[in-house]
Image (spheres, rainbow, N blue to C red):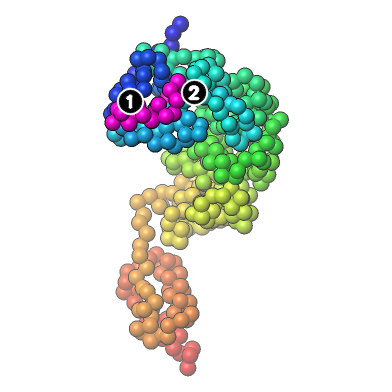
Amino acid sequence: MTTLLPDAAWRHGAGLVDLLAALGADEGAIRYVGGAVRDTLLGLAVSDVDCATRLLPDEVIARVRKAGFKAVPTGIAHGTVTAVLPGSTIEVTTLRRDVSTDGRRATVAFTDDWREDAARRDFTINALFADPSSGEVIDYFGGVGDLAEGHVRFIGDPLMRIAEDHLRILRFFRFHARFGRGAPDGPGLAACADRANDLMALSRERIADELLKLLALPDPAPTVALMHAHGIFRPVLPEIGEEGVARLTRLIDRETRSGARPDPVRRLAALLPRDPALAAQVASRLRLSNAMRARIELLAAPPAPETAPIPLAYRHPDAAVDLLLLSDMSDAELAAALAALDGWHRPTFPLRGGDLVKLGLRPGPQVAAALQAIERDWMAAGFPDGEWAARAAQAAVDQALRERQ
């Protein structure tokens, strides 16, 4: 039975029909491929559209430009040209076969064989083509059936696919977390566990990118637990243990019940030990941005259950909800704390160092110490108005001047 690609809004994007015509859609020279086909079959939103073509890259560039669009040779060594359309971009890649691979990169040769190109891809559900003219889905390896069954399966020998690109170990689990139902594919799981040490050959940036994509999914906790049980993290992230997996599971449950959006950095912090220095080391090892590194370090030390939410939110306005979700407070305490923050807006401390200097303090450490002390009292008093702050400032200056005498 022929499978047809359902109609979808992305197929009517500005300029797409003209681009496909220029690249030989009527001649069978170009097809949709990969995620756009997969996600459309599942009724999911499509963010990126990729095409495969028999045309060589130079011919693709010439035809794209002749059709009036900009052509960017984004990955020309691997046959990829990006066509810039009004409001979108389309990646067009010449059919390829691998000449050599080392687990991190591949040397390719161009081909005109659709099946040969599909055979070098990772999973059956990612090797689906679709004819732009007829909508017919071309499936060489049973990807449509696997998609319907929620079965993430390597194309051919899983060990061979992993040897070609070690990142496929992490991708196997991410795609299972997103599309899988029930137990993962047995041969695929066994191959990933057997070759987990291969992850050590990858750049930490690639590992971090794949891990954060996994943690951004609605509920990656069961898959993360599976990865831990089979030793997938051990070669590159040995800090992730059973306690971290349990914290992640609890965090996701709390996110769901509180309506908090999934956040991969918050979830990564849950997976790591509650040791800010160690968390910062892991973030540095993964080459995360400075902002992510600082945030993970902060979240590795969540507040005690009795911590008042408003002062916490004042001190950490961008991380208060994260800290509360990661804390050990009871579910009832957490609900009350989050409710207290609902609609709350951080007030501005009404004093500056110059205000204390005008009252008689000399610029320097004494001003900073006095200002911090007043701000702590102001927080404890419930953020009263400017008159309170002015009186507190005068009292602090008078005290400091008496101590100086």
Residue located at (49% from left, 49% from top): 322
Q: Is residue 100 above or below residue 324?
A: above
Residue 172 visible to the viewer? yes
CB atoms at circles 2 and 1 under 8 Å apart? Answer: no
Q: Quick one: label 1, few (<14), some, or many (20+) residues within 10 Å?
A: many
Q: Is residue 316 above or below residue 367?
A: above
Q: Position of residue 372 (x, y in %)?
A: 46, 73
Asked whether, in this view, residue 288 is left or right of residue 226, the answer is left
Residue at mark 2 to residue at mark 1: CA–CA distance:
18 Å
Asked whether, in this view, residue 325 is left or right of residue 386, the answer is right
Disc 2: which residue = 95
Mark 1: amino acid: Leu
Disc 1: which residue = 19
Q: Position of residue 317 (x, y in %)?
A: 43, 57
Q: Is residue 380 above or below residue 390?
A: above
Residue located at (47% from left, 34% from top): 76
Residue located at (65% from left, 44% from top): 237
Mark 2: amino acid: Leu
Asked whether, in this view, residue 107 is left or right of residue 195, the answer is left
Q: Which residues are magenta?
A: 48-68
Residue located at (45% from left, 61% from top): 315
